[in-house]
Structure formats: structure tokens, C-alpha cells
Image: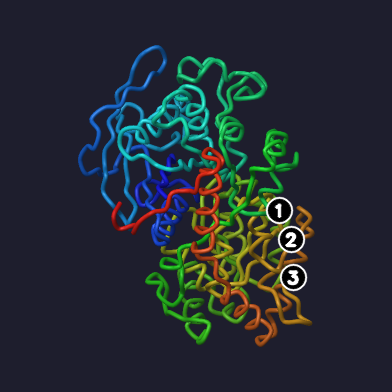
């Protein structure tokens, strides 16, 4: 099939979070299975584009017309990339905003991206299905069924909408309806209206043909008040079209057998190199040599309540009374940045903290730590726990979303399981799981069993790509009943 991705960010061109990883990896995996895939992104500052493929598309915006061009057309890893070129909207410092806050015209910026996605489908690269991601593209299915509802070139194209995080919804005041060229008829409780405001994510939930989330557990969770962020009723109402597909990971980048960032490569067949990686990690974070025989817990994360850092703050002193060391990498809310700086000062040689984004250090933590802590309040999918499995770094996680789907609680009697989980969102429950891990870590043979169980898991993109391909076919047939879905020729002929 021919699948057009439309997204607000995607590697190797732009990234703020896990969405960008998916928008790079899933198209590449689909191409490997014989599909034709193109990706449309905004051209942000610093993105290099090879020429213009369509000089101008006409988009209504706030009572006037805008004429962005469509650039790019180059093929990367078998995937064709296009870009919406509108410097006034996208040539800025930051993607969604700056440290001062969100850009005030984000509704207009991402409305234009949605309009441009449909225009690309009409004039540049006609797809069999359009796959859109998170609130910035939630308006595209709305426009396709309203503004373009009578357009014979696109009206029968189905859409798949993936919710990567229900907590980010794109909520704007009612005044953006005319400013962002949103069809006025959709401003009602059954469509985009959300307590008197406009909700882009709700638009995607209501109007897309099929909905997905990035893990099976998260697809269940968003139907509940605890995780639905006010849209649980909408999610329940679309339950027959809501499917959880676990994200995969790119093992060409995250694999201790080939990782160029780590001190010594290793594998499940020979774990010896992991010790060299631990010594290298200790040096990088200032962990004293006397702690080399004791477990190191690693953390790589955005510092936010969602990630469970309130539990760590609550139990910081208790955590450090255990016979362990802690290495932390990330940025985020100032109070948590200050927490880890304070812990490093209070426990020199046992706690190392780097308040930064550093890909090289992230790899070193995955390879050198003994355990990896992710006590998230909610986690739609999560990637670091999957990386940790591959590196023989045993995860300690809360049983939510993708963490629950990917980590199996260790069972000593049967020798099964890949890590340690706790269900209740509390500091006490987290500490029980940490102590279990530390206790089992004393026995080298038991610990190796847990490591090897995890390293044997395969969470590559091959299986999820196949699930998405079947979903695209179902979406296509929902718009073309009685017709077989189109088949792609060799993907090299895009």
C-alpha cells in the first residue's frame, strides 16, 4: 500500500520526544515489508531540503490565503520525505515553543500542516491511507471529512490517528476557529468543542477511521478517568476502532553488540564487557571505585511528574539508605533538576547527576548500570525499559502502559521474568520493588538469569509494522467495502 505519514516532528530532521523516533522507524520498517511510504513534516529551522517539488499550495487561514511550498522529495532509508515550507510559521527557535512558553499561533501553524497534508495527497503523492500522529495533526481527519468531503481526489482516503500521549491535547480558545480555518460546524460537543474550547486531539479521536495507541495497556487505560485526561468518554465511544500496537525499537542504534558509544561491546553469549561499561560509567559520573561491586541504578528521562519523580523525591533519603549508587541523566522541571543536584552533593561518590540531554551518556547508562528505574505515573509506551532489556540492565518499573506490556515480573521459582514491577502509585510500593531487585542482585547466577531473559526479547519494529499494515488494510476496506486493498510493488520503486 501507499501510506502517507503526516507529523509535527520526525528523525532524522526534528525531535522533541518519542514521537520523532516512531515517525522515523515505523516508515522504514513498512518499506522493508514492501510498502510505499512518504512522510510530511514542517521545515523547521536548520532542516536542509533538496529543492521544491510543488511551488505553492493554497491554504485559507484567518480570512486570508497562505501559499506554502512543498519541498524535499529525497529518499532516506527507502522513505520519501516532503516538507511544508513556510518560514513565518516554522523557521523559529524551537518546535512548539521556547522556554517562555508555547507559541501563541500553534493552532494556525498546525492547522496549516493538516491542510498541507491533504494537498500533498491531492497533488504530490497520492496515498491509499494517511497516518497522522498526536494533537498537531488531529485536525487532518476533520478537514478530510468536512472541507474536503466532496473532493473526489481525496474524500475516500481513510485516516489512522495514533495517540502517543493523551496528556497533550492541543486545546485552544474558541477564537482560533476562524483564525485557524477550522470548520465552524465542527464546534460542538460531538466534534471539536471541549468545555468551550477547541481540542485538536479530540478532533482526531472523533473523525479518524481507526485509532491506535502505542501499547495495548495504554489503549485500555485511556478509557478511564485516571488516564483519559477528560477524553475517556470519547475513547470509550470509539472503542471498536481503538487498537493498541506496541512501539518497536531500532536495534541498529541500541544494541550492546554494535554500540559505538560504550566502553566495550558485549552480548548475551559473553557478558564480560558489561563490567568494563560499568567502570566507564562510574568514571563518567564520579561514582567512587569502592562502589564497583554494588548495584548502580540508572535513570535517563525527562524530569516530570508523569515520569514518577515525585515518588523519588518523596523517598530520596530512604532510597540512598540502600546499598546502591544512582546515576541520573535528563532535564525538565526545575524542582527535580535541583533534587538530583542536591542528592549528588549530599552523597558524593554515590550519586552522579548530569542535567542535560546527552545521547552518548544515555548509551553509557544503558550499558553500565545494573538496573534501570522508571516509576512512571503513566507511560504510553516507553523505550528505555526496552533498551535496558537488550543491554542486560534489569528494569524496575511501575505496571502502567507499555511498561506493563514489556516487563514481566521475575519469578524465582520458575526462573522466568525480565524485571521488577509495582502496581500502586506510591513511594512505598516503589521501594519494595527496588529492594527486591537489590536482594536478587546479590546472587550472581540468579541475576544473570534475569539479564539473559531480557536480552532474549525481541521488540524490533518487524511485528508492529505488520500489525499497522493490517490496520491500514482494514481502514482502506472500511472506505471501500467489498474491494480488496491495493498491493504495493517493490518498495524501491517509490
Judge by depth and name the residue closer to the eye, 473 or 180.
473
How far apart in space, not on screen, are marks 3 and 2 (Cα)?
Answer: 9 Å
Task: Determine the residue positioned at 57% across, 32% down.
Answer: 207
Task: Pick out the residue farthest to the left.
Answer: 51
Give percent across and percent down for residue 299.
57, 61
Asked which secondary structure carries label 3, the reply is helix
Q: Which residue is mark 1?
A: 311
Indicate which disc, 3 or 1, sits on the residue closer to the N terminus: 1
Give percent across and percent down for residue 218.
66, 50
Indicate which disc, 2 or 1, sits on the residue closer to the N terminus: 1
Asked which secondary structure carries label 1, the reply is helix
Judge by depth and name the residue closer to the eye, 281 or 227.
227
Q: Which residue is mark 3?
A: 435
Left or right: 87, with 402 as reference point: left
Task: Determine the residue positioned at 39% across, 69% down.
Answer: 261
Task: Pick out the residue farthest to the top.
Answer: 63
Give percent across and percent down for residue 107.
48, 26
Amino acid at each position: 500500500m501507499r501510506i502517507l505519514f503526516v507529523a509535527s516532528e520526525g528523525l532524522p530532521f526534528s525531535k522533541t520526544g518519542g514521537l520523532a523516533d516512531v515517525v522515523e522507524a515505523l516508515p522504514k520498517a513498512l518499506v522493508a515489508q514492501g510498502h510505499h511510504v512518504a512522510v510530511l513534516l514542517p521545515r523547521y529551522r536548520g532542516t536542509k531540503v533538496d529543492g521544491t517539488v510543488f511551488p505553492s499550495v493554497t491554504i485559507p487561514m484567518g480570512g486570508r490565503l497562505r501559499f506554502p511550498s512543498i519541498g524535499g522529495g529525497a529518499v532516506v532509508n527507502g522513505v520519501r520525505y516532503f516538507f511544508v515550507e513556510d518560514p513565518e510559521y516554522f523557521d523559529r527557535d524551537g518546535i512548539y515553543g521556547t522556554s517562555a512558553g508555547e507559541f501563541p499561533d500553534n493552532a494556525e501553524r498546525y492547522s496549516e500542516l493538516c491542510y498541507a497534508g491533504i494537498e500533498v495527497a491531492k497533488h504530490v503523492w497520492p496515498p491509499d491511507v494517511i497516518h497522522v500522529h498526536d494533537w498537531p495533526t488531529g485536525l487532518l481527519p476533520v478537514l478530510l471529512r468536512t472541507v474536503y468531503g466532496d473532493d473526489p481526489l481525496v474524500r475516500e482516503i481513510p485516516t489512522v490517528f495514533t495517540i502517543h500521549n493523551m496528556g497533550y491535547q492541543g486545546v485552544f480558545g474558541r477564537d482560533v476557529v476562524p483564525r485557524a480555518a477550522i470548520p465552524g460546524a465542527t464546534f460542538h460537543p460531538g466534534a471539536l468543542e471541549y468545555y468551550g474550547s477547541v481540542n485538536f486531539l479530540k478532533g482526531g479521536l472523533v473523525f479518524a477511521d481507526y485509532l491506535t495507541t502505542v501499547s495495548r495497556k495504554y489503549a485500555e487505560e485511556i478509557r478511564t478517568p485516571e488516564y483519559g485526561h477528560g477524553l475517556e468518554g470519547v475513547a470509550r465511544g470509539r472503542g471498536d476502532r481503538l487498537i493498541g500496537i506496541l512501539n518497536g525499537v531500532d536495534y541498529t542504534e541500541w544494541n550492546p553488540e554494535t554500540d559505538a558509544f560504550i566502553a566495550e561491546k558485549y552480548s548475551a553469549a559473553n557478558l564480560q564487557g558489561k563490567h568494563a561499561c560499568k567502570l566507564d560509567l562510574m568514571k563518567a559520573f564520579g561514582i567512587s571505585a569502592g562502589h564497583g561491586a554494588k548495584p548502580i541504578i540508572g535513570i535517563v528521562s525527562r524530569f516530570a511528574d508523569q515520569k514518577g519523580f515525585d515518588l523519588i523525591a518523596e523517598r530520596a533519603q530512604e532510597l540512598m539508605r540502600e546499598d546502591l549508587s544512582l546515576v541520573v541523566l535528563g532535564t525538565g522541571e526545575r524542582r527535580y533538576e535541583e533534587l538530583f543536584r542536591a542528592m549528588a552533593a549530599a552523597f558524593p561518590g554515590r550519586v552522579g547527576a548530569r542535567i542535560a540531554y546527552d545521547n552518548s551518556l544515555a548509551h553509557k547508562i544503558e550499558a553500565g548500570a545494573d538496573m534501570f528505574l522508571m516509576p512512571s505515573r503513566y507511560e504510553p509506551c516507553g523505550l528505555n525499559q526496552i533498551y535496558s532489556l537488550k543491554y542486560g540492565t534489569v528494569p524496575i518499573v511501575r505496571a502502567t502502559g507499555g511498561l506493563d506490556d514489556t516487563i514481566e515480573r521475575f519469578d524465582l521459582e520458575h526462573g522466568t521474568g525480565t524485571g521488577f514491577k509495582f502496581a500502586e502509585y506510591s513511594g512505598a510500593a516503589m521501594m519494595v520493588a527496588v529492594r527486591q531487585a537489590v536482594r536478587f542482585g546479590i546472587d550472581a547466577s540468579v541475576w544473570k538469569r534475569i539479564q539473559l531473559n531480557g536480552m532474549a526479547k525481541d521488540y524490533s519494529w518487524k511485528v508492529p509494522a505488520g500489525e499497522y499494515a493490517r490496520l491500514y488494510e482494514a481502514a482502506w476496506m472500511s472506505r471501500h467495502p467489498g474491494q480488496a486493498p491495493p498491493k504495493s510493488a517493490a518498495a524501491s520503486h517509490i
